[in-house]
Image (spheres, rainbow, N blue to C red):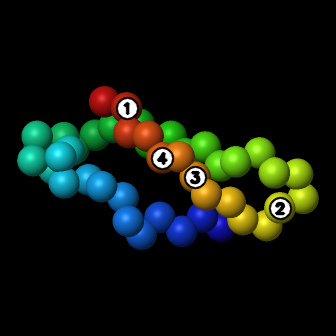
């Protein structure tokens, strides 16, 4: 399970963006139980 508490969505909200594709790429760690992620919002 990934915790995504601190996403920076202020810019998207200011531009009235209501729909986007959310892409999240975790690190490829074999046998790991958690990792940092790289979230991307594609409009």
Secondary structure of the residue carrying tag 3 is: strand
The quarter holding residue 35 reads: bottom right
Cα–Cα gap, marks 4 and 2: 19 Å
Residue where numbered disc 1 is placed? 42
Compared to 6, does 22 lie above or below?
above
**What residue is disc 3 on?**
37
Q: Is residue 43 left or right of residue 40?
A: left
Real-space Cα separation, disc 2 to disc 3, in angstroms = 13 Å
Q: Looking at the image, is mark 2 or mark 3 earlier in the sequence?
A: 2
Q: How many marks?
A: 4
Q: Nearer the viewer, residue 38 or 15?
A: 38
Among the two numbered marks 4 and 2 on one chain, the one whose residue lies closer to the N terminus: 2
Q: What residue did someone put label 2 on? A: 32
Q: Earlier in the sequence, mark 2 or mark 1?
A: 2
Q: CA distance from mark 4 to mark 1?
A: 10 Å
The residues bearing labels 3 and 4 have C-alpha atoms spaced at a distance of 6 Å
Point 60% across, 64% down: residue: 2
Q: Residue furthest top?
A: 43
């Amino acid at each position: 399970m990934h915790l995504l508490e601190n996403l920076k969505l202020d810019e998207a909200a200011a531009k009235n963006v209501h729909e986007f594709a959310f892409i999240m790429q975790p690190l490829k760690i074999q046998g790991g139980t958690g990792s940092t992620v790289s979230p991307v919002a594609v409009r």
